[in-house]
Image (cartoon, helix red, strand yellow):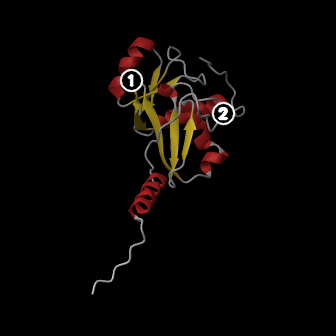
Amino acid sequence: MNFSISVGYSLKPIFLASVLLLAAACDRGPQEIRIGQQECDHCRMMISQEQFAAQLITQQGRQYAFDAIECMAAFVDSGDGRELDIHSLWVPDFNNPGNWIAAESAWYLQSDGLRSPMALNFSAYADEDAARRQQSGFDGRVVRWVEVREIVRDSWSGGTHGHSHNHH
């Protein structure tokens, strides 16, 4: 005897959808930033330039997006940022904005020749050579993530934003 029950539908699509949702919720790598549609989680300006954007991903996979590298640095050191269970920090390679680099391993150029939305003018690069090549054309100084945070703390210590915005 063959005993089988047919319910008339498959649970496979429901299972597959559940797995995909779970995988998306656990994604702690860099995520898409919706340029021109998503606002900065620090200063609330619209994120308008992909090459200067940045993002923080929590252990739970939640994204915090920023319009500038300096906004992410300020957020990380703010009360809001210190309370988060941070998994990773990401910055775009200025020469290839779709390529995300871990903030701690990136090299940064601070140059008035490359104006970022928040006016501290940081751009990020995958390696020191790329940052130095950019420096040769735009002057400025090459620094690491620790120095970016120090510069932001020193520059913006008078309040949330003691600076001007560069609107493009």
Viewer can see residue 165: yes
Quadrant location of the C terminus in the rendered image: top right
Residue drawn 40% across and 12% down? 137
Q: Does 33 sit left or right of 125 as displayed? A: right
List x then y, in percent, for residue 125.
40, 28
Q: Does 111 sit left or right of 117 as displayed? A: left
| Distance in Å between CA atoms under marks 2 and 1 | 25 Å
List x then y, in percent, for residue 87.
48, 50
Circle 1 Cα neighbour tier, 10 Å, few/some/many (<14 / 14–19 / ≥20): some
List x then y, in percent, for residue 47.
58, 29
How many numbered circles are shown?
Answer: 2
Residue assigned mark 2: 43
Residue drawn 45% across and 38% down? 103
Q: Inspect the image, locate mark 2, and give the three-letter code of the amino acid beneath it.
A: Cys
Residue assigned mark 1: 95
Q: Report which quarter residue 126 is drawn in.
A: top left
